Image (cartoon, rainbow, N blue to C red):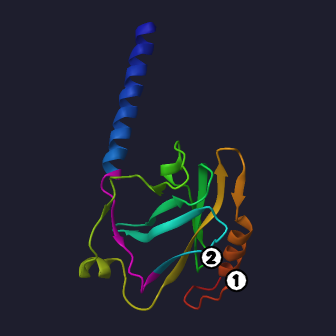
Amino acid sequence: MRIRRIILCLIFLSVCGAVAAQQRAQREKQRYVVAPREVYLLVSASQPDCPLRIEEAKLLLNVDRGWGISCRLHNQGSRPIRYVRLVAWTSYGTGSTLTPSSVGEKIILPGQTVPCDENDTDEIVPLTTELREKLKLQGPMKDVITLMIESIRFTDGTIYSDEETSKALLNYFQGLDHPNLPKE
């Protein structure tokens, strides 16, 4: 009975290891292009009272499918930051919350600048004519994406929040008429 448990544990561990290795291999294959600004415009919201500044923001389009955002976060305040919640809202009234992996277990000290994502496996490739056609990056502007800091938790437990503005922006975008979208 004991040997059977040991064998089952070893099988389980080897399957988990194989799955993790496969996920890493798939993750290593992620290739992105920087979205042309005349087609997809990424803007950072003006938040003059926010202690964190968004720098060098780029909208990245996955060559196969999906998108991502690359940016740097600069703590221009006087207190260390433990947690950041970024949001990206599209002019179509969709979007997502982006929790930077660079802040997960680390603290952003006053004056420090950190990348939004420390994933070195992603590759930014040049936007060729073929990729432009494949990703349908011709024609008029398709979307405006607004990036903003929704909330910050400092190491002393206090919180900066701009959730009211974030919700208002999302509601505004959701209320826009989009003639190119199918009507329900």
In front of the other: 141 or 66: 141
> Dot 1: what SS?
helix
Q: In the rendered structure, does residue 75 fall within the stretch colored magenta? A: no
Residue appearing at x 52%, y 49% in the figure: 103
Q: In the rendered structure, does residue 30 fall within the stretch colored magenta? A: yes
Magenta-drawn segment: 27-40
In front of the other: 12 or 73: 73
C-alpha gap between disc 2 and disc 1? 8 Å
Residue appearing at x 56%, y 60% in the figure: 76
In front of the other: 70 or 55: 55
Q: In the image, what residue type sits under mark 1?
A: Gly
Image: 13 above or below 180: above
* Circles 2, 1 touching at the beta carbon (< 8 Å): yes
Badge 1 crowding class, 10 Å Cα cut-off, few under 14, some 14 to 19, many 20 or more, is: few
> At which x and y percent is residue 69?
46, 65
Q: Mark 2 vs mark 1: which is more N-terminal?
A: 2
Residue labelled with disc 2: 93
In front of the other: 68 or 18: 68
> At which x and y percent is residue 183?
63, 86
Residue appearing at x 39%, y 76% in the figure: 35
